Image: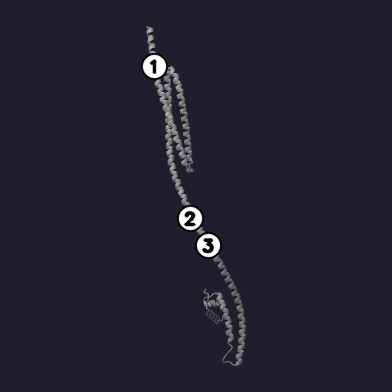
Amino acid sequence: MAVGVPENDVFAAADAVLARGERPTVERVRLELGRGSPARVGALLDQWWERLAERLRGETRLPGLPAEVAQAFVAIWQQATTLAQGVVEHSLAAQREQLTAEYERVAEVEEQARRDAAQARRQVAEAETARGNAETRLADLEKLLAQRQEQIDDLQQQRVELQGARSELQADLAALQQALREQQQQAEHNRLAQETYVRGVEERSHREVDRAREDLKARSLEAREQHKQLEALQKRLEHVQGALGEAQLQAAAREARSALAVEQGEHARQQLEAQLQAAQAGQASALQTAAAQQARAETLDAQLALLRLPTRKTRSRKTE
């Protein structure tokens, strides 16, 4: 509805309503105008009623009538005006009450509208704050997600590297096991060769037998020591295999510690290789010693044979 409707328009609308024989009210005047707020129309309608009374009091001259008739008519008119003014005053009081109620209702509506607007502004501010917080949280989550993805990529790369290192370690262990089996076979072969050699030496010379037995004991001790070393190596190898198996089982959950386990396995493998090489060197030395003893035994054999020849000749002459 428009606010600030001209008073002349309101007065003309009230005259039109009165001309139809109806009592001018706020709603009828607004209906006649087609616009205007109830407060504005009500205030101007009060002024219209006051001016209406003044206009009625101003119509005291009636030209063309006798003075007595005019005075009687004026008296009647004044009496009617007084009665109409009372009715108008009563109507105005009702309209004032209605306008007061309307003012209060409009004030309540305006106050409620102000409260709603303030609440809406607060809600908008809270929504803006929540949206800012959500955007900040989303940015933080995106950064965190990017960091987690980088960590996942690094862990996957480490896993690939650890799998390659594990494959190489398994290949090294397989080679080490094969070398250990060959070493055991060679040690067994050397032991059998030594036993065969000892039996031959015992048959050739009793004196050398004793020495050979001593040497055999020494070689046996060496062989036993080598066998113990081989068993120790076998146990360490099994320990390394167990450690490797445990490292393989724990590789998925403890990938950060896999590098250390691989280094320890590599170090253990290197130590085992060094010990195996030392054992091989000891066996080679034992074989060389055994070869020297065999050569010495053969030399003694030859000497014994030479010593036995004159004895046989002497026996032959005595027989003759």
Residue located beneath label 3 in the image: 125
Residue located beneath label 1 in the image: 303
What residue is at 48 percent from the left and 31 percent from the top?
Answer: 232
Label 3 residue SS: helix
Which of marks 3 and 1 precedes in the sequence? 3
Q: How many marks?
A: 3
Q: Is residue 49 left or right of residue 148?
A: right
Residue located beneath label 2 in the image: 139
**Amino acid residing under circle 3:** Ala
The residues bearing labels 3 and 2 have C-alpha atoms spaced at a distance of: 21 Å
Which residue is nearer to you in this view: 237 or 106?
A: 237
Location of residue 153 in the rendering, given as x and y in whole percent from the top left corner: 44, 47
Q: How would you rate the neighbour count of disc 3 (Cα within 10 Å): few for under 14, some for 14-19, many for 20 or more?
A: few
Kindly give the residue lying farthest to the bottom in the view shown. 66
**Amino acid residing under circle 2:** Ala
| Vertical position of residue 257 compared to residue 306: above or below | below
Q: How would you rate the neighbour count of disc 2 (Cα within 10 Å): few for under 14, some for 14-19, many for 20 or more?
A: few
Which of marks 2 and 3 precedes in the sequence? 3
